[in-house]
Image (tube, rainbow, N blue to C red):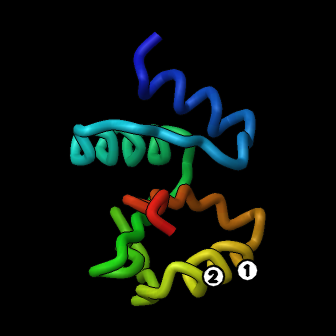
Amino acid sequence: MTFTAALETRLRARVPLIVVTTVEETRAVEAIRAAAEATGRRCVTWDLAAGFTALGPGAAPSITDPAAALEHITRVKDDDMTVFVLKDFHEF
């Protein structure tokens, strides 16, 4: 089973948190975006410099504070079906 297929399975199962550790960030984010798209979900990344960035249609807030980013994620409705990719968040 490929990484993308395994991720799709976990997204369909509504696993709330998936931790991916890799040195290939661009490739991992692309695989996550593809899995999100295949399961009908939006994909939004976050990093300290840019805040949230939508990887497809729709806007994303420009929140760069880590605590405020988590607060924003907790306010997203369950039926929104958004996959959040928090890059380098382990530092916080």
In the image, what residue type sits under mark 1? Arg
Measure how far apart labels 2 and 1 are at the Cα level: 5 Å
Q: Residue at x 42, y 23 (%)?
A: 3
* Callout 2–callout 1 Cβ contact below 8 Å: yes
Decide: is 23 above or below 55: above
x and y, in percent, of residue 36 in the image: 49, 46
Q: Which residue is mark 1?
A: 75
Q: Residue furthest right?
A: 78
- Disc 1 residue crowd, few under 14, some 14–19, many 20+, Cα 10 Å: few
Instruction: State the image coordinates of residue 85 (x, y, percent, origin top left).
Output: 46, 57
Query: In the displayed structure, does residue 73 sit left or right of residue 74?
Result: left
Count of marks, rendered view: 2
The answer to whether residue 50 is above or below residue 13 is below
- Taking depth in this image into account, of 65 and 17 the one nearest to the observer is 65
Q: Disc 2 marks which residue? A: 72
Residue displayed at 59% across by 82% down? 67
Of 23 and 16, which appears nearest the observer? Answer: 23
Element type at marker 2?
A: helix
Residue plotted at (73% across, 80% down): 75
Residue 74 in the image: state x and y as whole percent.
72, 74
Crowd band around label 2 with a 10 angstrom C-alpha radius: few (<14), some (14–19), many (20+)? few
- Residue 22, how many percent across, how many down? 33, 37
Which amino acid type corresponds to the residue marked 2 in the rendered image?
His
Q: Residue furthest front?
A: 91
Helix, strand or loop for disc 1 = helix
Q: Residue at x 48, y 87 (%)?
A: 65
Disc number placed over residue 36 in the picture, else none: none
